[in-house]
Image: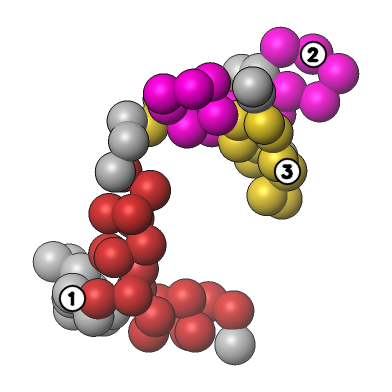
């Protein structure tokens, strides 16, 4: 069974039974970019975004960077 969701900013996600498949800019046409995430990668992305690890260049955490860019 294939599921699909729209996340915004032209990003779509589908599940092909093994990978989370991210596509971009594919409304009404073939996607211009595709990324296949293996199982466990989504959890690693969530962990990275909530862990407080500091960026090598800026020294800011993901949350600090997001707050600065959104707020």
Residue 49 placement (x, y as % from top left): 35, 68
Tag 1 secondary structure: loop
Q: Nearer the viewer, mark 2 or mark 3?
A: 3
The numbered mark at residue 28 is: none
Task: Tell me which label, 2 or 3, sits earlier in the chain.
Answer: 3
- Residue 23 magenta-highlighted: yes
- Residue projecting furthest to the right: 28
Q: Which residue is mark 1?
A: 54
54 versus 39 height, above or below: below
| Residue 43: percent from left, percent from top | 33, 54
Residue at the spot x=20%, y=69% of the render?
55
- In this orientation, which residue lies closer to the viewer: 51 or 32? 51
On-image quarter of the N terminus: top right
Q: Check disc 2 and report its element: helix, strand or loop.
A: loop
**Image position of 25 (left or right of 42):** right
Q: Nearer the viewer, mark 3 or mark 1?
A: 3
> Badge 1: few (under 14), some or many (20 or more) residues near its Cα, within 10 Å?
some
What secondary structure is marked by label 3? strand
- Left of 10 or right of it: where is 15? left
Q: Nearer the viewer, residue 34 or 38?
A: 38
Which quadrant would the C terminus be assigned to in this image?
bottom right
The residue segment tinted magenta is 15-30
Q: Which residue is mark 3?
A: 6
Residue identified by numbered label 2: 29
- Label 3 or label 1, whichever comes before in sequence order: 3
> In whole angstroms, how far apart are the C-alphas of marks 1 and 2?
38 Å
Mark 3 crowd level (few <14, some 14–19, many ≥20, 10 Å Cα) = few
Total tally of numbered discs in the picture: 3
């Amino acid at each position: 069974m294939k599921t699909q969701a729209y996340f915004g900013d032209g990003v779509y996600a589908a599940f092909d039974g093994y990978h989370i498949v991210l596509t971009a800019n594919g409304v009404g046409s073939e996607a211009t970019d595709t990324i296949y995430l293996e199982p466990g990668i989504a959890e690693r992305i969530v962990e990275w975004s909530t862990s407080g690890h500091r960026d090598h260049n800026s020294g800011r955490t993901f949350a600090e960077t997001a707050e600065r860019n959104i707020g």
